[in-house]
């Protein structure tokens, strides 16, 4: 199984909303991928807590799939690309690690 972990730092303001507002939208869109992309075995999204260090990334996504082939299918799926397009407009940076579990 492959675990895909992505952290996003959101812009303080983008698309007329705050980083937190955009993070909530992104979280909801990402959770909405469950059931739409068959290769997803598990998906979790967390938004940095308001009491946590403000230098932390804004949002963390963890997706589990069976193989790197499935990871590619997830990443190129039209529903994922739609969510990625939104996040691309509101993020400052991204960090990612893919590893076998």
Image (cartoon, helix red, strand yellow):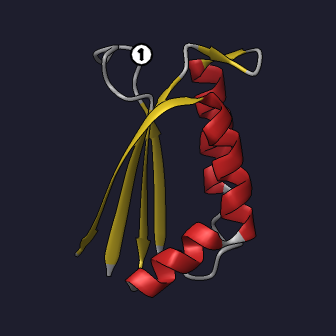
State the residue in front, 89 or 65.
Answer: 89
For the N terminus, the image quarter is: bottom left
Q: Position of residue 55 (x, y in %)?
A: 31, 17
37 to the left or right of 93: right
Q: Residue at x 67, y 33 (%)?
A: 89
Query: Mark 1: few, some, or many residues within 10 Å (few <14, many ≥20)?
Result: few
How many marks overall? 1
Q: Work out whether residue 10 can be spotted.
A: yes
Q: Residue at x 46, y 69 (%)?
A: 42
Q: Answer above or below: position of 23 versus 20.
A: below
**Location of residue 12 by image quarter:** top right
Q: Work out whether residue 29 can be spotted.
A: no
48 to the left or right of 53: right
**Location of residue 11 by image quarter:** top right
63 to the left or right of 82: left
Q: Position of residue 43 (x, y in %)?
A: 48, 62
Mark 1, residue position:
50
State the residue in front, 68 or 49.
Answer: 68
For the C terminus, the image quarter is: bottom left
Q: Position of residue 25 (x, y in %)?
A: 68, 36
Q: Residue at x 39, y 81 (%)?
A: 68
Q: Answer above or below: position of 20 versus 59.
A: above
Secondary structure at numbered mark 1: loop
Q: Residue at x 40, y 50 (%)?
A: 6
Q: Answer above or below: position of 9 versus 30.
A: above
């Amino acid at each position: 199984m492959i675990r895909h972990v992505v952290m996003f730092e959101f812009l303080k303001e983008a698309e007329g909303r705050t980083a937190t507002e955009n993070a909530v939208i992104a979280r909801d869109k990402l959770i909405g991928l469950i059931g739409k992309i068959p290769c997803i075995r598990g998906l979790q999204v967390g938004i940095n807590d308001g009491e946590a260090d403000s230098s932390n990334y804004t949002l963390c996504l963890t997706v589990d799939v069976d193989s790197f082939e499935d990871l590619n299918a997830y990443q190129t799926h039209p529903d994922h690309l739609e969510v990625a397009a939104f996040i691309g407009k509101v993020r400052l940076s991204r960090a990612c690690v893919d590893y076998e579990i």
